[in-house]
Amino acid sequence: MTREAEQGVPVLPGGPFPLPGEGERPARKDWDALLRLAGHHEVLPSLYASLKSRYAETCPPGVLDRARRISLRTAAMNVRRLREAAGVIQSLQKEGIETLLLKGAYLAETVYRDAALRPMMDVDLLVREEDLEAAGRALSGFGYIPEITYDRRVRHAARIVNTISYHAPERSLHVDLHLNLEPPASPFRMDPVGLWSRARPFAFEGVKCRTLSETDHLLHLCIHGAFRHLFYPLKTLFDLHLFLRRFGEEMDWESALRQAERWGAINTVRLCDGVLRSLGWAASPADTLASARHDDGAASRVEWAVEQILADRGAELLARRNIAQWWAAGGLRGKVKFLLKGAAWVPEGEIAGRTGRRRGARFLAARLLRLLAIAGKNLPALAGLLLHRGEIHRLAAMRRWISKG
């Protein structure tokens, strides 16, 4: 373990971020490229922590200062957003609405040790379905408005898209309310009742609240990083790296793997574990995931994922993700169902607010225009389907394998 790791500094490992070896003095352009890459993947504050403690003498003039300035801006925004998030949780509690803190804000407070190192734009909160409308009213009461105008059908909307997003014009924090960790159309089978029953107490910015169990956090990070984001930005993988460094030795891995199998998420664990190990990033304890690695298809998929990461092709693949997901949806019926129930679904309240109607020609025309707009937005990806069919097929096969666990 490095001196920085012993002191709790979230050191950014090598792999996609080729830090110089002892005595090396890379050219200025190499340092600039490294800073751009780290910023692109939202890990620059952690890179700065590594540079400051290990490479202060070898960095060209101005490189460390530039990284410091960017990191200080991130830190200032994070401090403000974390306080706002705590205020939101406390305000909801006063209305009798309990939440579970998810992902970024929780990770910033626990595994990063220094909350300023983990960039975040929003706070993700799990709420019970029966509290969803009351939570929306409470958020509206202190300045937040929904991203889309959800009317009385808000529960119906949330059941389909799983997330209702809110923002406040005078604040920098967005609030995302979730009914579950994944939408109903997801291939993964997690029960929100189980999430609540396993939740544990957590003190967040001085506010007593609750968060997921360590096992639920682990599986959520694996699904979120491997399936939802294809490890782009690499912040999703770094989150998992630090989570395992913090909790890996004390987790009940047999129980975690059984739960991964119940959720149908065992292949996300296999993929994440293999990618972390291939990159040389600290992963789970050496023997804990041995039983999860017995899969003939895992090795080739790990190799492909690592190739994409090292070639920095994450954004390119992510742009084709929806097309690959649509392609993997089965036959014609499955593809049409995915289009109508998933990517192209729009709450009726949004269209009714524009047209003044819920039925009739104007309403149907507005819905058709919305579908055409979505098709237009995805034209580059559709073109990519024709130009890069082999890659789309490979990506679709990867997503099918991930989701069949």
Image (spheres, grey):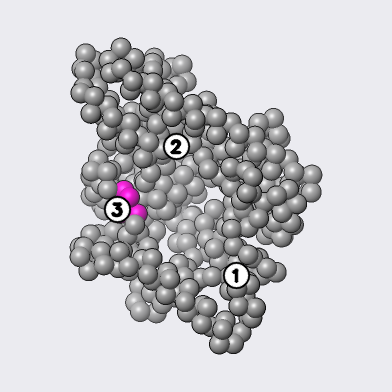
In the rendered structure, which amino acid carries the disc numbered 1?
Answer: Glu
Per the image, the residue denoted by label 2 is 239
Q: 48 left or right of 85? A: left
Q: Residue at x 31, y 36 (%)?
A: 37
Q: Residue 12, position in %: x, y?
A: 37, 28
Q: Are marks 3 and 1 in contact (CB under 8 Å)?
A: no
Q: Position of residue 279 (x, y in %)?
A: 28, 35
Q: Which residues are magenta?
A: 314-318
Q: CA distance from mark 1 to mark 2?
A: 35 Å
Which is more N-terminal, label 2 or label 1?
2
Q: What is the secondary structure assignment of the residue under circle 3?
A: helix
Query: Which image quarter is the C terminus in?
Result: bottom left
- Indicate which disc, 2 or 3, sits on the residue closer to the N terminus: 2
- Total numbered circles: 3
Q: Residue at 38% of width from left, 74% of height from top?
A: 335
Residue sitting at x 57%, y 81%: 363
Precedes in sequence: disc 3 or disc 1: 3
Marks 1/2 in contact by CB < 8 Å: the verdict is no
Q: Does residue 338 appear in the picture of this structure?
A: no
Numbered tag placed on residue 316 in the rendering: 3
Amino acid type for the residue under numbered disc 3? Glu
Q: Main secondary structure of the magenta part?
A: helix
Please tell me whether residue 97 is drawn above or below residue 12 in the rendered image. below
Q: Quadrant of residue 22?
A: top left
Q: Amino acid at mark 2?
A: Asp
Q: Is residue 51 left or right of residue 167?
A: left
Q: Please determine whether, in this image, residue 181 is positioned above or below residue 77.
A: below
Which secondary structure lies at badge 1?
A: helix
Number of the front mark, 2 or 3: 3
